[in-house]
Amino acid sequence: MMTSNLSRRQWLASSAALVSVAALPVWAQARAKTGPAHIVIVGGGVGGATAAKYLKLFDPSVKVTVIEKNRTYIKPYGSSEVLNQHASMDDLNVSYDTLRTQYGVNFVFDTVIGFDPQARTISTAGRQKITYDRLIVSPGIQLLYGAYEGYSEQVANTAVPSGWIPGAQTALLAKQLQGMRQGGTFVIAAPPNPYRCPPGPYERPALMAEWFGKHNPSAKIIIVDPKDSFVTDETMMLGWNRLYKFNLPDDYVKKMQDKVEIKQHAAAGMLSWVRGKDGGRTLKIDAKKMTIETEAETIKADVINVIPPMKAGQIAMTLGLTDASGWCPVNRRNFASTLQPHVHVIGDASMADAMPKSGFSANNQAKVVARAILEELAGRAAPEPLWENTCYALAGKDYGLFVADVFKIVDGKIARINTKARYLPLDASPAQIKLGARYQQAWLRTFTQDCFA
Amino acid sequence: MNTAPLTSRLAALAAASLLAVWAPGASAAQPAPAAPQPASALHADHTPPADAKAWTPSTLRQTLASLPKGNATQGQKVHEQLFCVSCHGAKGVAPTQNWPHLAGQRAAYTAKMLLDYQSGLRAEGQRAALMHDIAVMMTPQQIADVSAFYALQAAPRDDGTPRPNPQKAPKDFDAAQLIRKGDPARLLTPCASCHGVAGQGGNREASALAGQNPLYFVRTLLDYQTGVRANDSAKGMSTFAKKLTRTEIEALATHYADLPMGKTSSAR
């Protein structure tokens, strides 16, 4: 019935952002039925929760169990907004209640310690042994705190927080930033590729520049970066240029000035970006002296936020799903692990070629995998997958931007199929920029609904 | 693939507050998890605007008459630049079941809605909150232009959205009967007297209904019933909505959705 150019699988992928099925009358809902099977999902983040929900939506008769160590999910997306008081820590909490009561997803709050891929059983620290027909692993990332000399999880928990996986470190960083002395220096160490949430390390300093503008106008923000560019760099830096008197690097000015006016500020603002080619790569943290050493210099700071390099979540390694790269190789069509049978790996941990490590990607991958598993169990061919991703970011409270892409398999790899328009145009009108921010806020809410409610 | 509007389309796609999951081709074998209810009833944040003034027929007439003349070509630019296309489709036919179609809509109705979003008179939940944020950025000229643009688009046909199949209650009137004759016993004026025999709209700001997405149609009438939507002048619509049964509303939704009006739309 969803006819013409919006095919079934496109619809599946395009339902990405939103949803409260419960709000729909009966006649607007539809169900398939493939028979009782037990799908076990390890990890109750965006990927795992979405997979659980969509498995039950596609086929309510299937048994779905999520194994997750935390009773409440803490949203990573939007968590930087705790730092500038847009949001509270409580706003990041998401309950699993709706998935349990409304959709009949079974939750086991426990830690996975191993599995037997032949017998298809998974064992937990709480001595449970759970049998499955298919296993979906959505482990997220782990932060490699040990990548920089002087840095460790213990240092991150107490003095130099990361907060890239939200939690107590997010609260600590918020407290440090909001309590920073007048005129103090905030250094944020951006991560090397690949990493979770591509625009995130640049949105965070932008939000703080706005906050400092009101509360600590003589503060400085230095982004040290092992990279020379980042996704949404042009639109983000244009926002900085307009809002925080940021002077763009010459090569960006050259690239962009034909399309949009870029101001050259006589007195540059508080924000600066030290790129890889200028020695921005982090080497060492000294938490006692509060210094950060990069290839170019040693910077004395008041607050340091390190976003360390990352790899697939530990559970993926425990289960033997990662290769030498530290990420999980998968069959592109259905995200089946190429290393273990009857296991699918989704989200940040998977190697998904052109798809970024984002919540939106994990959500789309979860839907494709849910569908692929049910079709396979029913002895039918799964449809050709099509994925979308949108990453929203703020350069300021009312200054939104985004990257939006569509992907499909091209020559055996997941490739971007939209060639031109990916970003908010450089010549976007003030109304479009404001709407971008409005959409970002709406997305945070509706995306959570699509995954968890 | 036409990539030009893609980013904007995706941008607002994700801004939707309630995108429905619809697994086409699947059988409706299982009961729904929750009882049907107006979608907007889920939103706890419905706050009736403090300063938005309700219309009287005369203030409405004067306001609409004072709008500049709309230019459809300019209106198409507004449609694209303000991301309307994202939810309401490239030619005003929404690509999902979550939003109303605007193609073929009477210009006066579209303009009134935008004014109502601007003032906050329409404030039924998060959808309206988003429309409010957009409408406050619009000039009277842009409102007139975009309204003229939608009025020129072919009304939707076979939009592919789900159709209700209500169990007719013994006392229910048929949709055709309600539209053409109304129900004198309930003081129900025939729908056609304002919305046209073919659902084409026409009496002042009365909306065109032919081809409209039934989910939107039902939601709207339920919102009128509960008072969540109250932007009608002199309670011109809510009075009738309150007298209709749920199954009559669903029958009307189906009837109008499949009502062939005007040219065939190829918008999808």
Image: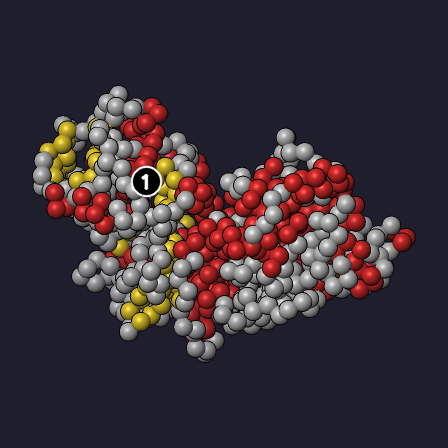
Residue depicted at 72% across the width and 42% down the height: B61
The N terminus of chain A sits in image quarter: bottom right
Label 1: which secondary element: helix
Task: Please tell me whether residue A395 is drawn above or below residue B82 in the rendered image.
Answer: above
Residue furthest right in the image = B185
Q: Tell me the subunit letter for badge 1.
A: A
Residue that appears at 53% across and 42% down: B138
Q: Is residue B126 left or right of residue A128?
A: right
- In the displayed structure, would residue A450 be above or below residue A206? below
Q: Residue furthest left?
A: A296
The spot of residue A379 in percent (x, y) is 45, 78
Q: How many marks?
A: 1
Q: Which residue position holds label 1?
A: A239
- State the image coordinates of residue A199 (x, y, percent, origin top left): 30, 47
Q: Residues within 10 Å of mark 1 (few under 14, many from 20)?
A: many
Residue A124 shows in this picture: no
* Viewer-side residue, A18 vs A246: A246
Closer-to-camera residue (B148/B96) = B148
Q: Is residue B260 left or right of residue A238?
A: right
Residue drawn at 31 percent across, 54 percent down: A357
What amino acid is found at the position of numbered circle 1 in the picture?
Answer: Gly
Residue in the image at 22% along x and 28% along y: A267
Q: Position of residue A43 (x, y in %)?
A: 37, 54
